[in-house]
Image: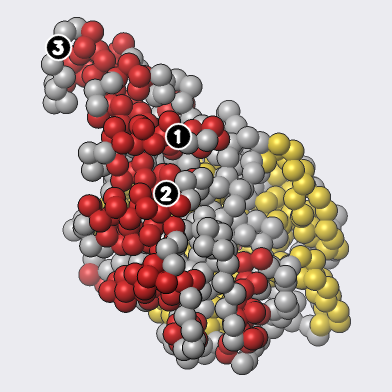
């Protein structure tokens, strides 16, 4: 068995730059509510809704990507022997990208043929395929499109690949260590979370495993009970479902499920923790773990036009996948309390499933028992999955992650991990904070220069507030830290003081978002965002926020005037073109709006669950139809809507409806 670095080349969209604007209640995903039906028992509600975060700060949004794919090389850390080859992408959150069984000549995962980010993650950018490791916070990993530290360790028991990073919101180190036995046919992952602080943390972990979806794909799991999560326009609905038959269909076959939903399987205590897929020929993937990972889940996009479109939007035409997942809790609406000075660890195994098709696709209970016996014969005792524990002989860094772990160790004056090292990594994001930490002086950039990063927590707040002479820049960051701590009044005061020293587009913008999202003062929100735009009119985020403000507060004509002054590259952004169309619709200039919202329209940053494109398509073309027929448009007129939709059907490529 050997670990080596290779180059993986594929068509890839450009990630673009980090968004320089802090999250002032801009990330709607983390504020989505939920409801529970009366099927959810009281003892099952203990952690549901606990530990949710109010902001993604200190992280920034990764929303600068496009859809113009060009061939790109990615670094790939590869573990392989004569039977199995596992490929990890340290530049992209340590994603397990491929698991190829050489004996079967079969890929066990869904491998996306392209790298195409979409707006599905906590920081916006997310991509489908492989196995994603999600830590700390409900949703996709904050670092899913960011580099991780990658180290190859030679031990007495063989070579182990380590992928690890410091997660800044929960303040923990997490790691995925990978190993394939010398003559083995199974990939073993030892996953770990280290909370070295003296504080209890809300914790979360789900390993999200993408596998191909075909009409014959079957999902097997040792339970007959499941939580069921539906997506509504603005919140989740948590219900219960029986397995395998629910609502008149066999839901062990994802191809039977009409719309997007999650099945959170409730495996009984005492049962082994596993989930598997079987294709028509009886071959698939088996994932199991030690008992720490109690949860298993199936996510499907569903068979509706919207679900099919999402599959292809994240990849290419004809692409289809589902996710089978393993987590620390029963559902993804839960965070589990992690005590201070604690390390949690477990082992996962990924291997091929091979069985008789007539059994694996036969009666469900017998199919489950067959997989259980197969697992025992192939892997032995699941609660004692093997992993190297021998002495380290050598280690080499294959890829560097961020500097944030290194900086955190300087702040704490101690190691934040018992095993993993954080060396300086020459990270652009951390440059000014390292200077501030080492010299006590915070560099002050030009007022129009985009902030490269943000920090949070009492250490940085105290250090900034104790500066002898504050600058517009130090006060900008004081406001951001105060806001991240929930101090809206203190944040407002700091940004106003920053403007008093020197006006900046960043303080104006933050005050606008504060008045819009926290203080419900639309007039002030407009005033400040226009001042920010007047200073930095070439910033895409500011343009989008100006457009959002003006198309919701009656400023449609003003937005159209501003749009015409924008440079060509901004005018071509799908989001800004959508806002132009919205303004035109609001002003009843429907023919002009139809020049934008048509079958060729592309909204590259459309968000999972967002209904804007279909909503405005129907509003626009039903209005146009009413004009053509000399009728007064009435949103409640079902006959008009039906006739208009027949003449102007929503194009497949614009249908992102998940509900």
Query: Do callouts 2 and 1 mark residues in contact (Cβ within 8 Å)?
Result: no
Which of the two discs, 2 and 1, labels the residue nearer the N terminus?
2
- In the picture, the quarter occupied by the C terminus is top left
Residue 308 screen position, x and y as percent: 47, 32
Which dot, 2 or 3, sits closer to the camera? 2
Q: Is residue 261 visible?
A: no
- State which tag comes first along the sequence, 3 or 1: 1
The label on residue 403 is: none
The residue where tag 2 is placed is 534
Looking at the image, which residue is at 48% across and 76% down? 471
Placement of 146 over or under 407, stated as above or below: above
| Residue occupying the point 79% across, 57% down | 78
Q: Which residue is mark 3?
A: 631
Which secondary structure, mark 1?
helix
**What's the residue at 65%, 72% (across, down)?**
431
| Tag 3 secondary structure | loop
| Residue matched to label 1 | 565
480 sits to left or right of 381: left
567 left or right of 588 in image: right
Q: Report the Cα–Cα distance between label 3 and label 1.
A: 36 Å
Query: Residue 72 at what x, y percent from top left?
Result: 74, 43
In this image, 370 relative to 597: left or right? right
Question: Dividing the picture into quarters, in which one does residue 46 lie?
Answer: bottom left
Q: Secondary structure at mark 2?
A: helix
User: What separation in Å lies between label 2 and label 1 (alpha carbons)?
Assistant: 12 Å
2 and 3 marks in contact (CB < 8 Å): no
Q: Residue at x 16, y 8 (%)?
A: 630
**Toward the viewer: 152 or 384?**
152
């Amino acid at each position: 068995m050997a670990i080596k670095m290779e180059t993986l080349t594929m068509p890839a969209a450009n990630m673009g730059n980090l968004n320089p604007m802090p999250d002032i209640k801009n990330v709607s995903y983390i504020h989505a509510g939920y409801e529970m039906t009366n099927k959810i028992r009281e003892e099952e509600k203990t952690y549901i809704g606990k530990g949710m975060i109010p902001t993604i700060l200190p992280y920034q949004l990764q929303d600068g990507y496009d859809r113009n794919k060009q061939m790109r090389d990615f670094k790939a850390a590869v573990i392989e022997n004569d039977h199995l080859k596992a490929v990890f992408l340290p530049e992209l959150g340590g994603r397990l990208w491929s698991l190829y069984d050489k004996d079967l000549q079969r890929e066990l995962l869904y491998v996306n043929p392209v790298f195409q980010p979409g707006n599905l993650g906590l920081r916006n950018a997310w991509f489908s395929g492989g196995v994603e490791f999600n830590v700390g916070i409900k949703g996709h990993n904050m670092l899913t499109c960011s580099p991780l530290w990658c180290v190859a360790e030679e031990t007495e028991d063989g070579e182990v690949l380590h992928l690890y990073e410091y997660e800044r919101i929960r303040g923990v180190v997490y790691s995925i260590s990978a190993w394939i036995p010398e003559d083995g046919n199974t990939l073993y992952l030892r996953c770990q979370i280290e909370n070295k602080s003296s504080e209890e943390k809300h914790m979360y972990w789900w390993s999200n495993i993408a596998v191909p979806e075909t009409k014959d794909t079957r999902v097997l799991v040792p339970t007959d009970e499941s939580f069921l999560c539906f997506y509504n326009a603005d919140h989740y609905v948590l219900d219960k479902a029986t397995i395998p038959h629910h609502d008149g269909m066999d839901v062990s076959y994802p191809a039977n499920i009409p719309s997007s939903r999650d099945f959170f399987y409730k495996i009984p205590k005492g049962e082994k923790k596993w989930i598997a897929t079987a294709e028509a020929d009886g071959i698939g993937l088996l994932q199991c773990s030690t008992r720490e990972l109690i949860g298993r889940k199936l996510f499907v996009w569903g068979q509706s036009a919207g679900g099919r479109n999402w599959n292809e939007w994240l990849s290419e035409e004809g692409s289809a996948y589902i996710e089978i997942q393993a987590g620390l809790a029963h559902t993804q609406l839960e965070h589990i309390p992690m005590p201070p000075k604690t390390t949690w660890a477990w082992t996962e195994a990924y291997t091929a499933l091979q069985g008789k098709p007539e059994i694996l696709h036969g009666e469900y209970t017998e199919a489950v028992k067959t997989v259980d016996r197969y697992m025992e014969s192939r892997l032995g005792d699941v609660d004692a999955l093997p992993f190297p524990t021998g002495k380290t002989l050598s280690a080499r860094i294959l890829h560097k992650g961020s500097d944030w772990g290194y900086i955190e160790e300087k702040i704490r004056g101690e190691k934040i991990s018992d095993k993993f090292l954080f060396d300086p990594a020459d990270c652009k994001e951390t440059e000014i904070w390292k200077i501030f930490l080492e010299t006590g002086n915070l560099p002050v950039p030009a007022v129009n220069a985009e902030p490269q990063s943000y920090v949070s927590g009492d250490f940085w707040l105290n250090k900034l507030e104790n500066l002898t002479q504050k600058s517009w820049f130090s006060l900008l960051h004081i406001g951001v830290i105060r806001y991240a701590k929930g101090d809206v009044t203190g944040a407002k005061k700091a940004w106003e003081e920053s403007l008093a020293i020197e006006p900046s587009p960043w303080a104006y913008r933050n005050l606008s978002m504060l008045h819009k999202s926290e203080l419900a003062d639309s007039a002030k929100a407009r005033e400040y965002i226009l001042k920010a735009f007047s200073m930095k009119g070439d910033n895409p985020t500011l343009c989008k926020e100006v457009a959002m403000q003006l198309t919701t507060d009656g400023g449609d004509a003003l937005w159209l005037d501003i749009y015409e002054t924008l440079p060509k590259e901004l005018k071509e952004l799908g989001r800004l073109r959508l806002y132009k169309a919205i303004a035109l619709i609001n002003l009843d200039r429907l023919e002009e709006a139809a020049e934008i919202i048509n079958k060729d329209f592309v909204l590259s940053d459309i968000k999972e669950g967002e209904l804007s494109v279909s909503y405005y398509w129907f509003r626009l073309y039903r209005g146009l139809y009413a004009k053509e027929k000399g009728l007064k448009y009435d949103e409640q007129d079902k006959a008009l809507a039906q006739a208009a939709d027949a003449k102007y059907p929503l194009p497949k490529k614009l249908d992102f409806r998940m509900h």
